[in-house]
Image (cartoon, rainbow, N blue to C red):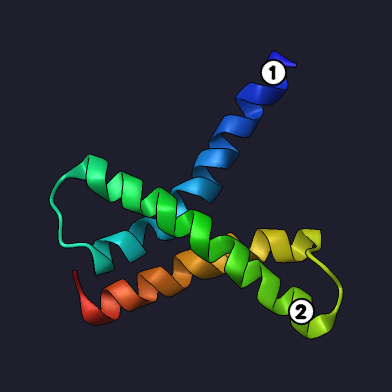
Amino acid sequence: MLFDLIRALPVAILVGVVPGWFWSRLLVASADRAERFAYSVGLSLALVPAVSLIPARLFGTGVTLAVAIASPLLVFFLGLAAYLRFGP
C-alpha cells in the first residue's frame, strides 16, 4: 500500500500543479514561488475538471481514461501557448 502511495505522489503533482503553472505565471504578477505554487494548484483544480467535462458532455461518453489523460495535457499546453504569446 505504501508503494502505491509513493507511485501516486508524482502523478498527483503532475496533475495538481503542472497544468496551472503557466496560467499562474500569466495571470498573477508575483515573484513569490509559494504564492505562484498556490495559484497553480488552484487553477489546476479548477481548469482540469472543467476541460475534462467538455468532451464528456459533447460526446456523451463520460470521463474516459483518454479524456482524463488529455485534459491536464491540454490545459498545460494551452497555458504554455498563452504564456509564450502574451508573456508574464
Q: Residue at x 51, y 65 (%)?
A: 47
Outermost right residue: 61
- State the image coordinates of residue 64 (x, y, percent, origin top left): 81, 63
Side (left or right) of 65 relative to 33: right
Side (left or right) of 45 relative to 64: left
Of the residues shown, which amino acid type is indicated by label 1? Phe
Outermost bottom residue: 58
- State the image coordinates of residue 78 (x, y, percent, origin top left): 45, 74
Q: Residue at x 35, y 65 (%)?
A: 23
Q: Residue at x 85, y 79 (%)?
A: 60
User: 45 above or below 62?
Assistant: above
Disc 2 residue crowd, few under 14, some 14–19, many 20+, Cα 10 Å: few
Please tell me whether mark 1 sits on a helix, a strand or a loop. Answer: helix
- State the image coordinates of residue 59 (x, y, percent, origin top left): 82, 82
Location of residue 22 by image quarter: bottom left
Outermost left residue: 31
Q: Which residue lies under the disc numbered 1?
A: 3
User: 29 above or below 85?
Assistant: above
For the residues bearing labels 2 and 1, Cβ distance under 8 angstroms: no
Q: Which residue lies under the disc numbered 2?
A: 57
Q: Residue at x 57, y 40 (%)?
A: 12
Of the residues shown, which amino acid type is indicated by label 2? Arg
Side (left or right) of 51 relative to 35: right
- Quadrant containing the N terminus is top right
User: In terms of depth relative to the viewer, which is nearer, 20 or 35?
Assistant: 35
Nearer-N-terminus badge (2/1): 1
Q: CA distance from mark 2 to mark 1?
A: 35 Å
Please tell me whether mark 2 sits on a helix, a strand or a loop. Answer: helix
- Quadrant containing the C terminus is bottom left
- State the image coordinates of residue 3 (x, y, percent, origin top left): 69, 18
User: 26 above or below 33?
Assistant: below
Disc 1 residue crowd, few under 14, some 14–19, many 20+, Cα 10 Å: few
